[in-house]
Image: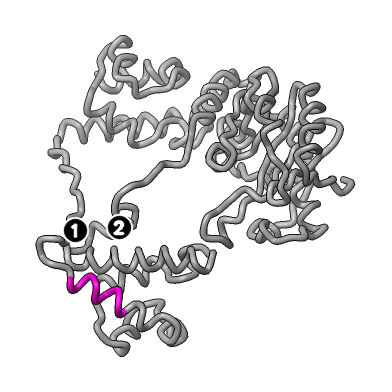
Amino acid sequence: MSLPIILTTTEQVAEFAAKLQLHPVIAVDLEADSMHNYQEKVCLLQFSTEDETVLIDPLAGAELAPLKPILADPAIRKIFHAADYDMRCLARDFTIEIDGLFDTMICSQFLGEDKFGLADLLRKYFSVELDKQYQRADWSRRPISEGMIRYAGEDTCHLHRLVEILEQQLIEMGRLEWVKEEFALLEKVRFAVHDGPLFLRFKGAGTLDRRQLAVLESLLQWRNTEARRRDCPLYKVLGNKSLLGLARLKPTGRNVLQQVEGVSPRLIDRYGSKLLQQVAVGLELAEMELPIYPRVERRVKDPAVDKRMDRLKAWRTKAAAELQLDPGVLINNATLDELARKQPTTEGELETVGLLKNWQRQVLGEGILRVLN
């Protein structure tokens, strides 16, 4: 593959968008800098038609507005691989909507592929080896190296041929409509907007008492501010495990800081005073102001529901084996649990509870009702 060109101006993007309109199918990907900066952002976009691969650099000032009508046009198929993160980033950073999605990772999952990463599929079908050294590269750095440019182009230039193979297999197996329904659902995913205390989104916070929770929130607020100041990911300031350890131990001196896993002497030299200050903020908070971790009321254990769940899982294992699909792709545990609780007994009830996708209801509905009855 020849080295793709990089568009850096809005005028170039507009000219390229006019060309894209003439193609019924385009392959799309993006590179972001989530491993390297405080607020991740889209740093590069890749587009491949059957004729050429072109990269667009939004960090150079190229506006993406000319691409919006094309990406929102359902008559133009947009091939992605593992589109979930890309959908969210494009919507957040550029208010770009995708209609006409075709995701090759979902295709491979519904074909029962053991490995469905892009590198695995390209190796299997085309004997193409992607250079993994660039997977964690800092795509916000400029200039972009020739190796990174080549890697970025490889992400989309093979997708047209890959779709031909995967789509034909899906047609032969009668599963093309299944994945189309999955694509339509995937087009709607967006990053969640979070409000309230930071501890609400912190794994392990629910194991702390109220005073420890106050210390944790103080530390989280400090880490967030420090990461923004340094423009780096949160974990590069201090890891989650260390934060949880600090909240539990509530250290009041440097000697105690050393007892927390992941808090090295070097880190203490840099942040020791700040960490102790933040712990003190949590310790000094008035009793009536201490945060409360919201508890979801536990469902009453029902032996009958548990038995139905066990039967549904056993049925799923058998059905997944017959269809040569991963059980979690076929139907997830959360859906099975709700089915076990609501126990629909007719096709009408099964449709009314609204737990299943259309393809699941058509393919699995009879078996589910048989198990529940």
Q: Quadrant of the N terminus?
A: top right
Identify the image quadrant of residue 297: top left
Q: In terms of depth relative to the viewer, which is nearer, 182 or 144? A: 144
Q: Circle 2 — which element? A: helix
Q: Is residue 237 left or right of residue 139?
A: left
Q: Is residue 113 left or right of residue 193?
A: right
Spatial CA distance of label 2 from label 1 is 10 Å
Residue 158 appears in the picture as rendered: no
Q: In terms of depth relative to the viewer, which is nearer, 66 or 264? A: 66
Please check the rendered image and state whether residue 199 is part of the magenta-colored stretch, yes or no: no
What x and y, as percent, mark residue 24? 75, 21
* Residue under the point 64% across and 38% down: 81
* Residue under the point 66% across and 50% down: 43
Disc 2 residue type?
Answer: Phe
What x and y, as percent, mark residue 259? 32, 83
Look at mark 1 in the image and give the residue it sits on.
Answer: 291
Q: Are marks 2 and 1 in contact (CB under 8 Å)?
A: yes
* Residue under the point 52% across and 69% down: 230
What x and y, as percent, mark residue 356? 38, 23
* Residue under the point 61% across and 35% down: 108
Which segment did they paint magenta? 276-284
Disc 1 residue type?
Answer: Pro
What x and y, as percent, mark residue 184? 53, 24
Report the residue that reaches farthest toward the left. 288
Q: How is the image coloured?
A: one colour
Q: In terms of depth relative to the viewer, which is nearer, 230 or 159? A: 230
Q: Circle 1 — which element? A: loop
**Neighbour tally class for label 2: few under 14, some 14-19, many 20 plus, Cα within 10 Å:** many
Circle on res. 199? 2
Identify the image quadrant of residue 257: bottom left
Query: Is 31 drawn above or below residue 348 in the view shown?
Result: below
